[in-house]
């Protein structure tokens, strides 16, 4: 019987070969909405290093991703918004050349992740043509307009936040907490999910992320 529910954070983390030094990890979330904060904390406690993190931002304070960066576990950030009004953790390390940064326009990042999940190796976009973000990238002209080639993003691990899940791993999301989570669940070798509430079954008409993309889940309750 398929049952992807776990009942301790230890069982979520153990025997997962993707949790290793040098791993690339996708972190869902937009601001504080849809962030798998408890899973991020569990990864930090493992003490692994040299991580490449793909996230919309670079942490919003002394919690979650911010603390993971502060612990010096992160070698490189791939994100859209590296600066935060609530935190200087990433900014201070970057100014000391202690962490790398790849800035990606938000729509381009979403499409790079979606392409990774769909098995598309690269695509062309007009976004960032003629800017510093285009340096070193292949360009082509289509119908008289220049486009950049952007490569798909695939990862070892995705840490996802969801509203509800059934034992098969079918997920729903709550409003804007959906954000990057569905496409990130598709673009990783292993997907770990923290869920607000387990349910008996998610209606097929309401499933956003099918269970085929989910490996393990843990119930974390409502956010306080």
Image: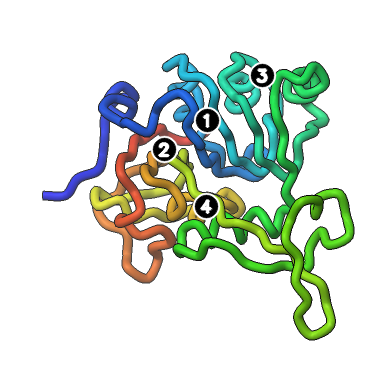
Q: Quadrant of residue 72?
A: top right
Q: Which quarter of the rendered picture does the C terminus lie within?
A: top right
Q: Which of marks 4 and 3 is in front?
A: 3
Q: Distance between the residues labelled 3 and 2?
A: 20 Å
Mark closest to the chain's N terminus, 4 or 2: 4
- Sequence order check, earlier mark of 3 and 2: 3
Image coordinates of residue 197 in percent, x first then y, are 37, 42
Q: Name the residue under label 1.
A: 37
Q: Name the residue under label 4.
A: 174
Residue at 64% x, 37% y: name it. 32
Sooner in the amino-acid sequence: mark 4 or mark 3: 3
Q: Residue placed at 69% from the left, 33% from the top?
A: 58
Within 10 Å of the Cα at label 2, are there few (<14), some (14-19), or many (20+) other Cα atoms? many
Name the residue carrying label 3: 62
Whether the residues at callouts 2 and 1 have beta carbons within 8 Å, the answer is yes
Q: How busy is the neighbourhood of tag 4: few (under 14 within 10 Å), some, or many (20 plus)?
A: some
To which residue does mark 2 refer? 194
Of the numbered discs 2 and 1, the one sitting upstream in the chain is 1
- Residue at left offset 56%, top offset 56%: 152
Q: How far apart are marks 2 and 1 (CA)?
A: 9 Å
Q: Which of marks 3 and 1 is nearer the N terminus?
A: 1
Q: Distance between the residues labelled 3 and 1?
A: 12 Å
| Cα–Cα gap, marks 4 and 3 | 25 Å
x and y percent of residue 6 in the render?
26, 34
């Amino acid at each position: 019987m398929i049952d992807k529910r776990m009942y301790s954070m230890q069982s979520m983390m153990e025997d997962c070969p993707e949790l290793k030094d040098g791993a690339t990890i996708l972190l869902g979330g937009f601001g504080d909405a849809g962030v798998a904060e408890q899973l991020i904390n569990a990864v930090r406690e493992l003490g692994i290093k040299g991580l490449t993190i793909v996230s919309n931002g670079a942490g919003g304070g002394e919690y979650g991703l911010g603390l993971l960066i502060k612990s010096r576990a992160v070698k490189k950030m791939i994100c859209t918004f590296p600066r935060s009004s609530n935190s200087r953790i990433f900014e201070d390390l970057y100014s000391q050349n202690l962490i790398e940064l790849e800035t990606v326009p938000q729509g381009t990042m979403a499409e790079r992740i979606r392409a990774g999940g769909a098995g598309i190796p690269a695509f062309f976009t007009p976004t960032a043509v003629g800017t510093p973000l285009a340096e070193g990238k292949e360009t082509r002209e289509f119908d008289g307009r220049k486009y950049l080639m952007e490569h798909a993003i695939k990862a070892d691990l995705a840490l996802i936040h969801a509203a509800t899940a059934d034992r098969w791993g079918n997920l729903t999301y709550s409003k804007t907490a959906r954000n990057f989570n569905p496409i990130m669940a598709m673009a990783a070798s292993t997907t770990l999910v923290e869920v607000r509430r387990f349910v008996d079954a998610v209606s097929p008409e309401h499933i956003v992320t099918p269970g085929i993309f989910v490996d393990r889940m843990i119930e974390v309750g409502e956010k306080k």
